[in-house]
Image (cartoon, rainbow, N blue to C red):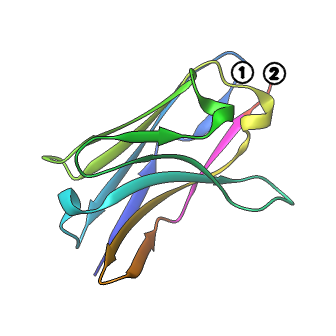
Amino acid sequence: QVQLVESGGGLVQPGGSLRLSCAASGIIFSSYTMGWYRQAPGKQRELVATILSGGYTNSADFVKGRFTISRDNAKNTVYLQMNSLKPEDTAVYYCNANKIRNGFRTDYWGQGTQVTVSS
C-alpha cells in the first residue's frame, strides 16, 4: 500500500518560513519523481516544484528564489523549504510521486497539508 504523508504546514506571518516534509512508503522511492503541488480555494491545483530521482529540480516561476525542493532517498522523504512566504502562497500543499513506465504515468498523492500565510 502506497502512502505519502505530509507534515509541516501551519500558520505563518508574511515573510516567514516553513518546511514541509513528505514521507513515502510502499514505493521504491529513489525511482520516482517527487513533487509538490498546491491548491488554493476556488483555484485549480498547480505545480510548485519537482525533483527527479537523480536530484534535478524544476520549480514554478512564482516560487523561484523562495522555495527549494530536496529529497533524501535514504529516508524516503521529500522536502519543500519555503521562505519569504506571501499571503498568496496560502493553499493546501500536496505531495506527489510519479513514474512513467512504458509510456504510462502512475501518480500517487498525499492527503495534503494546509499552509496559511497571514498576519
Which residue ends up furthest to the front in the rendered image?
103
Q: Which mark is residue 119?
A: 2
Label 2, residues with CA under 10 Å away: few <14, some 14-19, many ≥20: few
Label 1, residues with CA under 10 Å away: few <14, some 14-19, many ≥20: some
Q: Is residue 56 above or below residue 118?
A: below
Q: Which residues are magenta?
A: 111-116
SS class, disc 2: loop
Which residue ends up furthest to the right in the rendered image?
42
Residue 17 located within the stretch drawn in magenta: no
- The answer to whether 113 appears left or right of 62 in the picture is left
Q: Position of residue 119 (x, y in %)?
A: 81, 21
Quarter holding residue 112: bottom right
In percent of the image, x 68 and y 15: which residue is there? 15
- The answer to whether 109 appears left or right of 72 in the picture is right
Return the residue nearer the eye: 117 or 89: 89
- The answer to whether 86 appears left or right of 6 in the picture is right
Q: Is residue 15 above or below residue 19?
A: above
Q: Position of residue 93 (x, y in %)?
A: 59, 51
* Quadrant of the frame with the N terminus: bottom left
Label 2 is placed on what type of residue? Ser
Residue under numbered circle 1: 13
Q: Are marks 1 and 2 in contact (CB under 8 Å)?
A: yes
SS class, disc 1: loop
**Type of secondary structure dominating the magenta stretch:** strand
Q: Position of residue 40 (x, y in %)?
A: 77, 52
Q: Position of residue 102 (x, y in %)?
A: 30, 84
